[in-house]
Amino acid sequence: MYKIGILFENREFEHDVYELIKAFYPEAEIHTLYEDDEAEYDLRFRVERENDNYIIKYERAENLPNQETEKKGAITAEVITDETTGENAECGIKDAHALRKENKDSIKYALYQLLVKLTGKTLPWGNLTGIRPAKLAMGMIESGMKNTEVAQEMREKYLVSPQKTALAITIANREREILKDIDYENGYSLYIGIPFCPSICLYCSFSSYPLKVWEKRTDEYVEALCKEVRETALMMKGKKLDTIYIGGGTPTTLLPHQIRKLLNTVGETFGFEGLAEFTVEAGRPDSITREKLEAIREYPVTRISVNPQTMNQETLEIIGRKHTVDQTKEAFHLARELGFDNINMDLIVGLPGEDIYMVERTLEQVRELAPDSITVHSLAVKRAARLNIFKEKYQEMSFENNQEIMDLTMKTAYEMGMGPYYLYRQKNMKGNFENVGYAKVDKAGIYNILIMEEKQPIIALGAGGSSKLVFDHGKRIERVENVKDVSNYISRIDEMIERKRKAIAIWL
């Protein structure tokens, strides 16, 4: 494993530099330094600022590949100031946020060129890190730029590949079309989290807990959650609710009477009238029963998910999903039988041991089921996931994702009558790719667009809920967090409610 050191003169753009280097060296052990040390590194970077330039120096050990590159060298990036751009007090000095962004773009552009030189490879999304590509494209379109101008900006300034540029622009335009009749700036969406699962998947880092451990306290959880629902509805009175999304975890770990209690409370307090969308993420096939789906059907739920992740039984066993491929098919057919006409299926590519042929097998079986949308995730292993915590145990497994696999998923989606409608990226994604939602006409997940493009406040309830208070025309976002631990959430529910009350009063 490569060992990389990054010495910062100060902490300016520390996170952006780290993330871009990590994208080129995903398996490396990277150390962030603030003073020189005596440790030996395969590759050492030094980031400095001298007057009008940022300077990024590097020094390589002898054992790194691509040795035609010099053992040491440097690259510079211009420091952007008000004087650089010709702006002054009379004509409106650029605000600090805009200047910071321009300087971040400048240093990342230079660093990307250096990393291409050092590694001999490019990244499909160029130097974009910590940025939602479709949101970036949408912002440029909304500013009045033509699609061709947006494409040029993404390719030349952010060094995004032509294929990914086209994908981002296609999605941005479809998102705008889907949202055109929703007054999202004057509305909000509601997220309700159920933090229980039949078992915890190997790659999972969400606030999720095994049902067997908590099933004696699920009634307490639902009671606390309903209290938060009632109190939050009073805080949001007079504001327009656009979408509801019940996720997790796995919402269908709740029993039918618990589902009814929760949905009754939501209906009595927030109301269901005028919703653009109401999603319940049924999720794990081994949590779905006829009785639970019948309970959901009693309410105006417009969209559900039945999520296999893969249709390869051997992979399901490796990743800790305690259900079978047949159970996935049975759950899907049951949902259709009960009248659900907008069903999403989540898939993950890059799972341990899966090659393109196994992905193709999954896609063929999903095609036979004919869902209304699919969401294709590139495996991203977060720090809290068991796959990362116990990585030594799994280090012999292969994790394969490449452009050929991503192209196959897109081709299959198109053949199923679906087009891409939302996109997001996460840290540590295999192959530095993306997650893409594909949907048939009028079957796109509106909530997914609203949360990813940060178009309106998302009020999140339940353990681990993270509310995003979007305001000032999307220029500002404040977060309000609920505690993740279920016991703490139950015992501190009044505190969680008060956090929201204060934040909503200040920001909304």
Image (cartoon, rainbow, N blue to C red):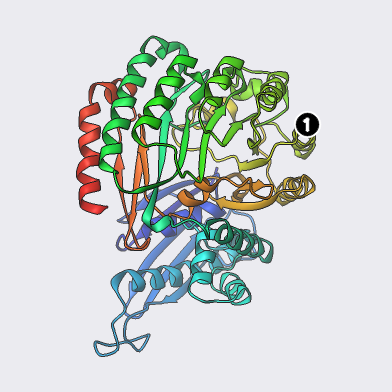
Residue appearing at x 38%, y 60% in the figure: 474
Q: State left or right for residue 163 relative to residue 6.
A: right
Q: Residue furthest top?
A: 216
Q: How many marks?
A: 1
Q: Position of residue 75 (x, y in %)?
A: 48, 73
Q: Quadrant of residue 66?
A: bottom right
Q: Give percent across and percent down for residue 28.
A: 52, 46
Q: Is residue 41 visible?
A: no
Where is residue 145 shown, x and y percent of the image? 54, 76
Q: Residue at x 65, y 52 (%)?
A: 420
Q: What residue sits 52% from the left and 42% below the top? A: 277
Which secondary structure lies at badge 1? Answer: helix
Please rate how many residues cluster around mark 1, counting C-alpha atoms within 10 Å: few if below 14, some from 14 to 19, many from 20.
some
Residue 384 percent location from the top left of the image: 44, 32
Task: Please state which of residues 166 and 338 is positioned toward the viewer in this rendering.
Answer: 338
Q: Quadrant of the N terminus?
A: top right
Q: Nearer the viewer, residue 289 or 395?
A: 289
Q: Looking at the picture, which amino acid does disc 1 mark?
A: Gln
Q: Is residue 345 left or right of residue 82?
A: right
Is residue 100 at all visible to an observer of this figure?
Answer: yes
Mark 1 lies on residue: 365
Tell me which residue sits at (53%, 33%) in the image.
Answer: 301
Left or right of residue 444: residue 240: left
Instruction: Name above or below for residue 219 compared with residue 42.
Output: above
Give whichever of 99, 374 is nearer the camera. 374
